[in-house]
Image (spheres, rainbow, N blue to C red):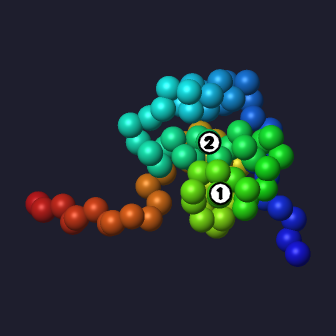
Amino acid sequence: MAEPVRVRRLTDQEGQRLRQIVRRGSTNSVRYRRAMMLPASAGGNRAPVIARLVQADEDTVRDVIHAFNEKGLACLDSQWGGRPSPPTRR
């Protein structure tokens, strides 16, 4: 079995920003849910527990954690999945 995925250690600034997003809420529900995943992982929770907490798929939780470990808070705004943008007209 593979090692459980965990978020890297949060900096003080990252922790403050995540708390701010979660406390104030967000008009973007995806951003809000992703912001909830990271401190939950930092607190020692595994992907299945976090997935139930934020009502997401376990693989989605793992993807967000991996993205955070690579890109930092930019992972909150990434445009994964969903409907593709319509082509631009020239």
**Residue 4, quarter of the rendered image:** bottom right
**Residue 16, quarter of the rendered image:** top right
Residue at horizontal 54 percent and vertical 31 percent from the top: 21
**Residues tagged 2 and 1 counted as in contact (Cβ below 8 A):** no
Q: Please name the amino acid that badge 2 sits on.
A: Met
Point out which mark residue 36 bears: 2
**Front residue of this view, candidates 70 and 90:** 70
Residue 75 in picture, x, y percent from top left? 56, 47
Distance Cα–Cα, label 2 vs label 1 = 12 Å
N-term-proximal mark, 2 vs 1: 2
Residue at horizontal 44 percent and vertical 45 percent from the top: 29
Residue 71 in picture, x, y percent from top left? 62, 46
Residue at horizontal 64 percent and vertical 51 percent from the top: 53
Nearest-to-viewer mark from 2 and 1: 1
Give above or below for 17 relative to 42: above
Residue 5 in picture, x, y percent from top left? 79, 58
**Front residue of this view, candidates 80 and 44:** 44
Asked whether, in this view, residue 86 is left or right of residue 90, the answer is: right
Give above or below for 85 relative to 2: above
Quarter that holds the C terminus: bottom left
Residue 44 in picture, x, y percent from top left? 83, 46
Q: Please name the amino acid that badge 1 sits on.
A: Arg
Outermost residue, left direction? Answer: 90
Question: Callout 2: helix, strand or loop?
Answer: helix
Quarter that holds the N terminus: bottom right
Asked whether, in this view, residue 89 is left or right of residue 19, the answer is: left
Observer able to see residue 80: yes
User: How many other residues sit within 10 Å of disc 2, few (<14), some (14-19) or many (≥20)?
Assistant: some
Question: Callout 1: helix, strand or loop?
Answer: helix
Observer able to see residue 66: no
Residue with the mark numbered 1:
52
User: How many other residues sit within 10 Å of disc 1, few (<14), some (14-19) or many (≥20)?
Assistant: few
